[in-house]
Image: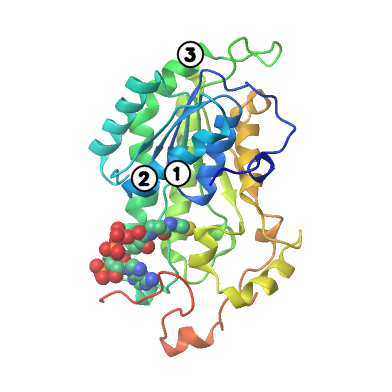
């Protein structure tokens, strides 16, 4: 569904700052990543979004393309980030059809709520594979193209870049592992790995002009993450417990993306930008999400969230 610009972007950014640039995004049909890509497209970029579901990915690509007349947005479905050969083929297709990969958003993720004693080895592996290995596969498939882009778009911080910026990657992570979050061991371990990977890319590829950073969203309204990870009836209580007093919006994550990818983010490298209204500084436990620790001690599965079940142990 075409969106009003303010639903995905603040009006403070300059039109055309990403003209002739290409953004490649895994998980691009999701609510947060599609807003990030839509904002980039609005500001001039063409895009390639990657997903597992063909119809969902292609439909979202066509929708994102409405953000700017003449925009080209490829939706490449049937790509599982756990399969390096599928990602390599997607990156090659993106470069062949759109000419380059200047920006990468590693956004594909897997999540559900369950305590560690209710998940199988395969469940743990699925999340680690999607988040950690999937991010690694994304970096491997796109790095040669990012290096080419970075070499053309080096910035010195003193003069405006003549052809804009390029050679930048953002990993979409989480704040779960900063303080520890029950029912989220699998994702906490995975996102800690994603954060570490982003830092490694920054220190290894920084000398080539690449920047590699993390955006860690807090609870963002109307997203699959919130549907999967919180009960409807607890959300008002949760919002009150967030220092900013409300859930975030996908636009607020998109704005953080533009900050890091544009001339404003040149010297930010190897950092985590937390966009959560201050939530991680408070305890997430007991904010109306579940009866902690009663149901855990009873051995019950998490009820009332999308995707809640017990593995075959
Ligand atoms: N509790 C415990 N185990 C669970 C579970 C839950 N809520 N949901 C899935 N699992 C287990 C499955 O039972 C299976 O383990 P098993 O083979 O030992 O039974 C394992 O996880 C893999 O599940 P499967 O559905 O086969 O894997 P998948 O690769 O298709 O799905 C998931 C990956 C599990 C991460 C799934 O939740 C998913 O597809 N998520 C994508 C969307 C998403 O999470 N986005 C993130 C928004 S924040």
What's the mark number on residue 107?
A: none
What's the mark number on residue 151?
A: 3
State which tag comes first along the sequence, 1 or 2.
2
**Relative to 122, residue 156 above or below:** above
**Which mark's residue is nearer the viewer, 2 or 3?**
2
- Residue at the image point whose x is 59% and y is 62% from the top: 179
Q: CA distance from mark 1 to mark 3?
A: 31 Å
Q: At numbered mark 3, what does the secondary structure look like: helix, strand or loop?
A: helix
Classify 10 Å Cα crowding around label 2: few (below 14), some (14-19), many (20 and above). Answer: many
- Residue at the image point whose x is 67% and y is 70% from the top: 238
**Relative to 95, residue 280 above or below:** below
Classify 10 Å Cα crowding around label 3: few (below 14), some (14-19), many (20 and above). Answer: some
- Answer yes or no: disc 1 within 8 Å of ligand 1: no
Q: Which residue matches tag 1?
A: 60
Q: Which residue matches tag 2?
A: 51
Q: Does residue 15 appear left or right of residue 243 in this picture? A: left
Quadrant position of residue 125: bottom left
């Amino acid at each position: 569904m075409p969106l009003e610009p303010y639903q995905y972007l603040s009006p403070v950014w300059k039109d055309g700052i990403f003209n002739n640039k290409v953004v490649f995004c895994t998980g691009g049909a999701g609510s947060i990543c599609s807003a990030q890509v839509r904002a980039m497209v609005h500001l001039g970029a063409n895009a390639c979004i990657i997903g597992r579901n063909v119809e969902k990915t292609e439909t979202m690509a066509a929708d994102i393309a409405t953000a700017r007349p003449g925009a080209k947005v490829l939706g490449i479905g049937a790509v599982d980030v756990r399969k390096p050969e599928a990602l390599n083929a997607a990156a090659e297709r993106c470069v062949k059809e759109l000419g380059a990969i200047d920006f990468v958003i590693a956004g594909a993720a897997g999540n559900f709520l369950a305590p560690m004693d209710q998940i199988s080895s395969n469940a743990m592996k699925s999340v680690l594979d999607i988040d950690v290995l999937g991010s690694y596969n994304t970096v491997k498939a796109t790095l040669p193209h990012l290096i080419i882009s970075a070499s053309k778009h080096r910035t010195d911080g003193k003069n405006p870049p003549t052809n804009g910026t390029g050679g930048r990657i953002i990993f979409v992570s989480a704040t779960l592992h900063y303080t520890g979050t029950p029912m989220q061991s699998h994702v906490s371990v995975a996102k800690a790995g994603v954060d570490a990977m982003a830092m490694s890319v920054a220190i290894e590829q920084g000398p080539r002009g690449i920047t590699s950073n993390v955006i860690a969203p807090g609870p963002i309204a109307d997203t699959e993450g919130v549907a999967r990870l919180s009960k409807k009836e607890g959300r008002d209580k949760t919002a009150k417990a967030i220092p900013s007093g409300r859930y975030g919006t996908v636009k607020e994550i998109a704005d953080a993306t533009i900050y890091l990818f544009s001339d404003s983010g040149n010297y930010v490298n190897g950092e985590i930008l937390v966009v959560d209204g201050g939530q991680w500084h408070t305890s997430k436990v007991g904010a109306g999400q579940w009866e902690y620790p009663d149901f855990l001690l009873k051995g019950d599965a998490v009820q009332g969230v999308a995707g809640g079940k017990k593995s075959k142990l």
